[in-house]
Image (tube, rainbow, N blue to C red):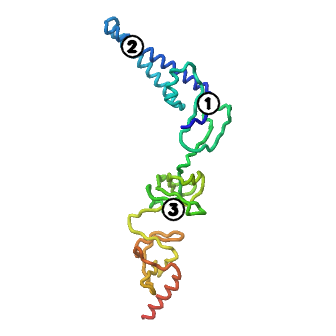
Amino acid sequence: GQILLELESYEYGNLVAEYLQANAEKVYQENKLNRIKLLVDKKISSMSDLDKAEAEFTRANAVLRGSYSKLKAVGTTENDISNLINSTSINSNLKIFAPLSGTIDQHLIEHGQSVIAYDKMLSIIDLSKVLVRGYVSPDDGANVKAGDKIKAAQKNNVLNFIEGNISTINPALDEINKSIVINAELNTKNNWPKPGENLKVEITVISSSPEITIPLSSVAYDGDQSVVFVKASETKFEQRPIIIKKIYAQSAIVSAGLYEDEEIAVNQIFSLKALIRFEDYAEE
């Protein structure tokens, strides 16, 4: 990543010194071990001397690995660590690299300012993707699952949208909204939308059984029975009972009674109902 900041740190200087000392000790113990191996081969030194040298080398190597891990933990690159060995001086300046691609959103420190551990210095936002969080009622949430298609559109311009699939569904009910929370990581379009923006979310659910969605205005009732008026010819509609699985504010899901591509009346429903009843009375 790109270098964002450079901190002069006493603690970092100590980590560098610790690493250099550990490396020198490891080299010394390695050379010592090799010498004792030669002496053992010539029967000048005993096996106990060799065992002790091997233990000291193992200990020195472990200390070096620990020092290396500390430098890596604060963000020092492998190339910078390798260059420390050949350096003639200890540089206590720690380079801070960007952990991800994106844009700096907040710059909270000034040049030369003193900072302490865990102080927030910068915030970076990756605008190539956003995490869209949607809220679904508990009843509807039973039909939603990870992998379902989702579309997130601008509230005042539904033609401006991004789409993808639901990534995860929170297992618990959101206490504030009393809703099930769905999460979707979506690719942005020309760096839109921005984090914190409110969007209109639509979810496409794949049902295990065939279902048809119709406008709620097309539904009438014959007693307790839900009915619609299906186009039988250019001049005639017939009343047909249906089974409604779910009713929404502007639509209803029909689980039985209608077939795909059938046309139904969506207005003047009461006139059609009255006309059909009049025809029934006329036949009697």
**Residue at screen point 61% across, 34% down:** 5
The amino acid type of the residue labelled 2 equals Leu
Give the percent coordinates (x, y) of residue 64. 47, 22
Foreground of the two, 237 or 84: 84
Name the residue carrying label 1: 7
The quadrant in which the C terminus is found is bottom left
**Gap between marks 3 and 1, in whole Å?**
47 Å
Q: Residues within 10 Å of mark 1 (few under 14, many from 20)?
A: some
Q: Earlier in the sequence, mark 3 or mark 2?
A: 2
Q: How many marks?
A: 3
Give the percent coordinates (x, y) of residue 230. 44, 80
Figure check: 94 above or below 151:
above
Q: Earlier in the sequence, mark 1 or mark 2?
A: 1
**Residue at screen point 44% across, 58% down:** 148
The amino acid type of the residue labelled 3 equals Glu
Q: Earlier in the sequence, mark 3 or mark 1?
A: 1
Name the residue carrying label 2: 33
Name the residue carrying label 3: 202
Foreground of the two, 62 or 37: 37
Which structural element holds mark 1? strand
The amino acid type of the residue labelled 1 equals Leu
Asked if disc 3 and disc 1 are in contact, CB closer than 8 Å, the reply is: no
Which structural element holds mark 2? helix
